[in-house]
């Protein structure tokens, strides 16, 4: 997904005490992940500020880890782009009975660097040291327009 500067993505779950919220977030620029209660999220979404705090936060462009849930309740995870440029973000978030912070990189077997956003195409690239194999593509065809918007 693309997050413009100042924008955020969120999702929420009803989580039982003793479970974990596992996450893996990869981005081409630094983003911040927050874990909040329903009350904290409602305050943030109405004011844009963490007036009632948050349970957990971590920043970076390669975030993996977990949050242990002590009490049953509704928990929100926010991915916030608090940088100055658009962030291309890929994420995996799930609720599990045991923590699982050993994530594989989210890339597919190969990537040709064009994504469709609405009715427009965006050309992108990324750098990583997570490659574990090599792919040779002998033929590929796309139907992108003559020029694509260039990503960050």
Image (cartoon, rainbow, N blue to C red):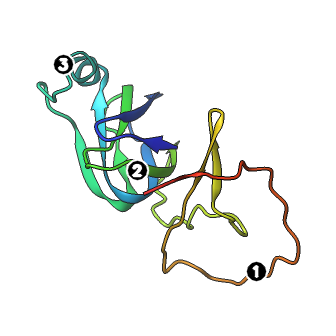
Element under disc 3? helix
Q: Which mark is residue 47?
A: 3
Label 2 vs 1, first from the N-terminus = 2
Please rate how many residues cluster around mark 1, counting C-alpha atoms within 10 Å: few if below 14, some from 14 to 19, many from 20.
few
* Callout in the foreground (2, 3): 2
Instruction: Read off the residue under disc 2.
Output: 87
Q: Where is residue 80? Give x, y as percent.
A: 32, 41
Please report contact status of discs 1 and 3: CB closer than 8 Å, yes or no: no
Query: Which residue corresponds to the image point at 88% horizontal and 72% vertical from the top-left?
Result: 139
Query: Which residue corresponds to the image point at 47% horizontal and 50% vertical from the top-left?
Result: 89
Q: CA distance from mark 2 to mark 3?
A: 23 Å
Query: Which residue corresponds to the image point at 64% horizontal and 52% vertical from the top-left?
Result: 147
Q: Where is residue 4? Give x, y as percent.
A: 38, 40
Q: Which mark is residue 48?
A: none
Q: Where is residue 107? Give x, y as percent.
A: 62, 64
Q: CA distance from mark 2 to mark 1?
A: 26 Å
Label 2 vs 3, first from the N-terminus = 3
Q: Judge left or right: residue 127 versus residue 38.
A: right
**Residue farthest left in this picture:** 51
Q: Of residues 134 and 53, which is closer to you in this image? A: 134
Residue 64 appears in view: no
Q: Is residue 103 above or below residue 90?
A: below
Element under disc 2? strand
Q: Is residue 75 above or below residue 104?
A: above
In which quadrant is the C terminus drawn? bottom left
Q: CA distance from mark 1 to mark 3?
A: 47 Å
Instruction: Read off the residue under disc 1.
Output: 135
Residue 108 appears in view: yes
Give the image quarter of residue 52: top left
Please report contact status of discs 2 and 3: CB closer than 8 Å, yes or no: no
Please rate how many residues cluster around mark 3, counting C-alpha atoms within 10 Å: few if below 14, some from 14 to 19, many from 20.
few
């Amino acid at each position: 997904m693309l997050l413009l500067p100042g924008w955020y993505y969120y999702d929420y779950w009803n989580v039982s005490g003793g479970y974990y919220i596992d996450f893996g977030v990869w981005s081409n620029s630094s983003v911040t992940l927050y874990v909040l209660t329903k009350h904290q999220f409602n305050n943030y979404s109405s004011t844009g500020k963490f007036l009632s705090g948050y349970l957990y936060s971590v920043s970076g462009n390669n975030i993996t880890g977990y949050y242990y849930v002590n009490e049953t309740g509704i928990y929100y995870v926010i991915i916030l782009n608090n940088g100055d440029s658009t962030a291309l973000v890929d994420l995996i978030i799930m609720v599990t009975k045991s923590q699982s912070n050993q994530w594989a990189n989210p890339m597919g077997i190969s990537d040709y660097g064009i994504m469709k956003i609405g009715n427009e195409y965006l050309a992108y690239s990324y750098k990583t040291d997570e490659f574990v194999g090599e792919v040779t593509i002998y033929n590929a065809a796309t139907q992108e327009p003559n020029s694509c918007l260039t990503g960050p």
